[in-house]
Amino acid sequence: MRLAQRLATRLITSDALRDTRRRLARLRRRGGRRADFYWDVADPYAALALPFLARLAERHALAVRVLLVPPPDAAAAPEATRLAAYARADARRVATALGQPEIAPDAPSPEQLDAAERTACAALTEGVPLARLATLAQAIAAGAPLPGPAATAAQVAAARAEGAARRAEAGHYLGSVTSFEGEHYWGVDRLHYLAARLAGETGEPPAPCPLLDARLPGAPSATGEGPTLDVFLSLRSPYSLIAAERIGALAAHYGAALRLRFVLPMVMRGLPVPAAKRLYISLDTKREAARHGIAFGTIVDPVGLGVERGLAVLHAADQAGRGLDFGRAFLRAAFARGIDMTGAGLFRVAAGVGLDRAFVEAALADQSWRAVAEANRAALFHLGLWGVPSFQVADRPGHWGQDRLWAVEDDLRAALGLAPIDRRMPCAV
């Protein structure tokens, strides 16, 4: 069973399978390259993605069909209220970092949202160019007046139903996602992968797309005692692997005191993770890991007993000053080496970071990690977050996702009184 899981995950995440699918998709093309963009008008990330997608489409002769979609269902986004609040705050940060138009701090009222959907639906029905749709999305996100015709409620409902069906058929579940020939690119954060893919087919330079990331030039910037950096992670989270591999260097660069705040995985806290979401996360983690030179893809899912045993050892290792070392080793073993962590594999992984058998056995006999995990979960929810990896610098607002290390870096620099990094990337539409 474990061997089958290793082989299956290695195949699913392999570059060979990805490249084969791309070749087959090119052979099936009729009338040029076409992509779909799923537009949830309540999602502020659309205002960030559409302007760059419009420029990318023009550069690479990509026809884009914009589809109106509803918000993700409860299975895909179980903390809908927290997600909406965090998305708006996060999108505002991204807009500022990229030099994009400001996004309103408050979510639209139900009446404003209804008007926005009607206006968007009418624009889609009229075949408004992508650049104008981008401007409309920015106006919606800014809470600006929306001139122009409005569709009926029945037209909106029909458009949303069609968009939801096509999104599900394509294998996704979120808004602000661009789908192109079997691969998905969320928000503005992943458009650089699509730009590189399109450019690779023709050999032309890719359209400029944002690539926000932490920068660690030269020697450490910090002198003296730095701020506290809390890192919330799970031992079943592929994205936590990428964070664990990189966060130590970021903390050391700025002299931050790193604190691991481990939590139980969502599924072990009673929150569902649909198959489409699991597949997307695996494939997205693979390309993010590859970009950072991190091994990923031979997986034995540690959910259940493997995670519980790992957290017991992680708790003890953290108290011994080896928490990050063991956390990295566990995640590598589960997600890159395909090691079963329910048996002897755990002892081998622990030994690799200097934790002997007696240490591991003592850790496994101690159940105090459960109370710590629950306290960490409560702290995470107090930040308005629920997923991992997440981060907090001192008492500043939290950030969710391994692709927000640039925002963590901004907070570290601000806490140390260092000049901010200019990450702006203008995009005229």
Image (cartoon, helix red, strand yellow):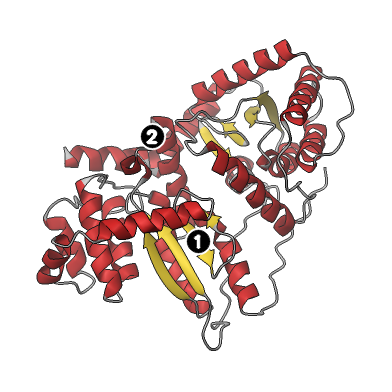
| Residue 272: numbered disc | 2
Give residue 55's position: percent from left, percent from top.
75, 42
What type is the residue that disc 2 sits on?
A: Pro
Q: Residue furthest right?
A: 147
Give residue 97's position: percent from left, percent from top.
70, 59
323 versus 238 height, above or below: below
Q: Compare marks 1 and 2 and give the one earlier in the sequence.
A: 2
- Kindly identify which residue carries mark 1: 391
What type is the residue that disc 1 sits on?
A: Phe
Give residue 51's position: percent from left, percent from top.
75, 42
Along the horizontal axis of the image, is 50 left or right of 294? right
Residue located at (53% from left, 88% from top) = 224
Closer to the camera in the image, 27 or 269: 269
**Quarter of the view holding residue 46:** top right
Along the horizontal axis of the image, is 376 left or right of 87? left
Give residue 117's position: percent from left, percent from top.
74, 25
